[in-house]
Amino acid sequence: MIIAIDGPAASGKGTLGKRLAAHYHFRHLDTGVIYRAVAKALLDARIDLGDEAAAVAAAMELDPEKFGDPVLKTQAVGDAASVVSAYPKVREALVTFQRQFAAEPPGAVLDGRDIGTVICPDADVKIFVVAAPEVRARRRTLEAKARGEVADEALVLADILRRDDRDKNRAVAPLKPAPDAHLLDNSHLDIEGGVRAAIAIVEAVRAGRQRV
Ligand code: DC
């Protein structure tokens, strides 16, 4: 079984993905980390983010062993990831890795922007997570502070809106729900409530119901 979870920055899809995977004993891939790793490679080498060829080369040399690096989670790397992920050839270079991950048993949960639309259009369950931008900014600020980073909520909100805009309006694989995705608005849910709602969606699809 493949579960695709898409949604905008800081919507909580990563946590949901991880929790769903644990619940069903599936493997989990946070695909944002892949684009973040490409961006970090450029930032580390002080290569301009506008250098598409360098971004493609970095995408082809990725080392999944390094996906756990906490630096990848920072706002600066996330913003840079939003830039390099708009390059069609960067996305192309990363398709096979993601599809192979999805296909391996016993099942997988992938979260990102284009999992239900491009990477796994045949996913068994597609969930599109949304939350009000202000709510996402509040959560992301608290997370950053918990990591010991300095974070200004107004700046975090501006970053989220800028990234949403870039991710939604790019020419290739823009952020948008697949026609058969189930919307999950977690603006007013805590983590446990979001997890319960996501499991209810998966179970309803499994039970063969069309509407949840
Ligand atoms: O989900 P995230 O914040 O870790 O993602 C970082 C950036 O990577 C995001 O702004 C857009 C890009 N991304 C993407 O284009 N496609 C994905 N499947 C996942 C992330």
Image (cartoon, helix red, strand yellow):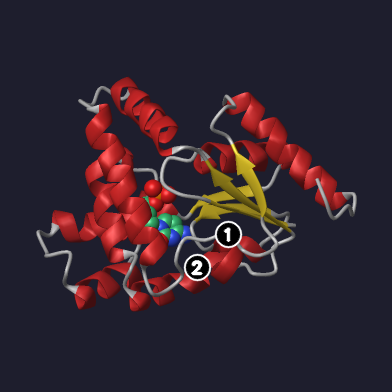
Quarter of the picture holding the N terminus: bottom right
Q: Is residue 33 left or right of residue 190?
A: left
Placement of 134 over or under 44, stated as above or below: above
Viewer-closest of 118 and 209 = 209
**Marked residue nearer the N-terminal end (2 or 1):** 2
Q: Is residue 156 left or right of residue 106?
A: left
Disc 1 secondary structure class: loop
Query: Whole-percent x and y of residue 188?
Result: 57, 27
Mark 2 and mark 1: span between their CA atoms? Answer: 22 Å
Placement of 7 over or under 144, stated as above or below: below
Q: Quadrant of residue 140?
A: top left
Query: Whole-percent x and y of residue 51?
Result: 16, 72
Q: Residue at x 24, y 55 (%)?
A: 80
Quarter of the rendered image showing ligand 1: bottom left
- Which labelled disc corresponds to residue 177? 1
Placement of 148 over or under 161, stated as above or below: above
Give the residue pinned by disc 2: 97
Q: Would residue 164 be seen by someone viewing this image from the given angle? A: yes
Viewer-closest of 25 and 144 = 144
Query: Whole-percent x and y of residue 25?
Result: 71, 42
